Image (cartoon, grey):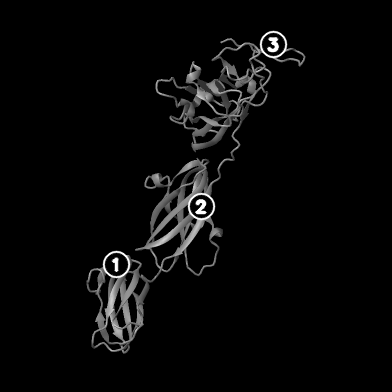
Amino acid sequence: MKIVIKILLIISIFFIAKPSSAQIFSDDTLAVVKLLNSFRTTPSTLEFDLVLLKSSDTWRYFANSTFQLIFPIADYNYNNLKVELIPGSSDLTLTSPGVPPYKILAGTVANRIQIITLGPEKIEDSHVIPIDSVVKMGRFRITALDGTVIPDYVYWIRPITYYQAAAFKYDENNPVPPYIVVVDYEDNVEMSNAGENFISYSDDPTTPPIMSLEFFNARYIGNLKVNLWFKTYSEYHAQGFIIKRSVRLPENGEDLESMPDDAFTVGVANWRNPDYTAMLTAQFTSKIGREYGTVVDEVQYRGVEYIYRLYYENDAGEIVKLATRALTIPNAVIEYAQADPNPFSTQTKIRYFVRDDVSLTCVVYDRIGQLVAKLKDYDTGELLENKETKVGWHETIFSATDVTAQGSYDVVFIAYPINDPGVELSRAVVKVQLLRDKIR
């Protein structure tokens, strides 16, 4: 390679010109190299993107580079680190069949992290980069070999012109930089020289993602069970999540968030418990949240308000509150029952919701309290007399016979929760009106 670097000491020094066919080189920035999307995926692992933006049409083919980074900690032990390119993350490794790919080497030296890119020898094998386009040189992973907590970010070691370097391959159709005295076709031309820098280096400007919660939900699903689930917007230094609960009477007007943490004495789920580790381990540091759950909590009492509080554990082992939710466990196990049509002329369908697994009876009484009919399950045809009925929606039909008198009737549901002997019964009454020879 025939390249002689000319250091421009004073403006009066005359430039040794390239033959007349050479174009005039512009001193504008040739490229910008950026560190982006840095975040710790675990306490001991940091990932980041290294990208190159071509900002000038002075060059076309990328040749090679040497980039050197450090942590913002004095006397850091770089021998404790493993540095690697995440497979498949570099645009530069995408070449045609039979063409030597770019080789990217990542590792450490005594006091820094070093990433080296080696390009093909031939210009026709080199990566063409259009102006204003971005090439992802790769996503890199730094891991502390002993599992210790790693810093949040890396930055370019300075001075830039001493530690950092990038080059393009000379194409005879491109201009020649003024600091180059002699250059041959396919030579690697540095984007900087000892006195001037025509490539810009940008540290990651990204604000570390905060621990942000999108929602935390609690829903009673019947049979004294509660479903709990939540979703994050982003996560920062969250190792895992914890759910605790307290209990109080429904009429208590205390603000949920003002309840002290020591009131939450029952542990529902903890990411350190092997039963919940897979479900509640956090992403540690992520700019994209995800949904967690569902955790199922089994409660004991009806007619009380259960208070659930969601926490996360940070990398310092501190337990940090995120949100608090409350729900009342209903006394009634039949929460909804409605007839349609009502009034009716021949029959009416009663739709009802059973909150728990129950033993259910459904009968019809007239206005003076006489038993008129025993109803059946609409789907199975089984008589609703101490029938085991599962949580959910159900239907039954009340049909008027030829001898059924016009007037009002009470459709009575009586339910005994199968799994809760503490509740004697739950009762629901639907009033229906029979109108003979009438149109609704």
Residue at mark 1 to residue at mark 3: CA–CA distance: 98 Å
Mark 1 highlights which residue?
418
391 over 9 or under it: above or below: below
- N-terminal of the pair, mark 1 or mark 2, is 2
Answer with left or right where residue 397 lies relative to residue 19. left
**Residue marked by disc 2:** 214
Point out the frontmost of discs 3 and 2: 3
Residue 310, position as x, y percentages in the image: 48, 53
Location of residue 72 with respect to 61 vertically, above or below: below
Q: Is residue 153 visible?
A: no
Q: Amino acid at mark 3?
A: Ile
Residue at 22% from the left image edge and 74% from the top image edge: 383
249 relative to 399 in the view: left or right: right
Say if residue 59 shows up in the picture. Answer: yes
> Looking at numbered disc 2 in the image, what kind of residue is underneath it?
Glu
Label pair 3/2, CB-CB below 8 angstroms: no
Residue nearest the observer in this picture, 305 or 136: 136
Residue with the mark numbered 3: 16
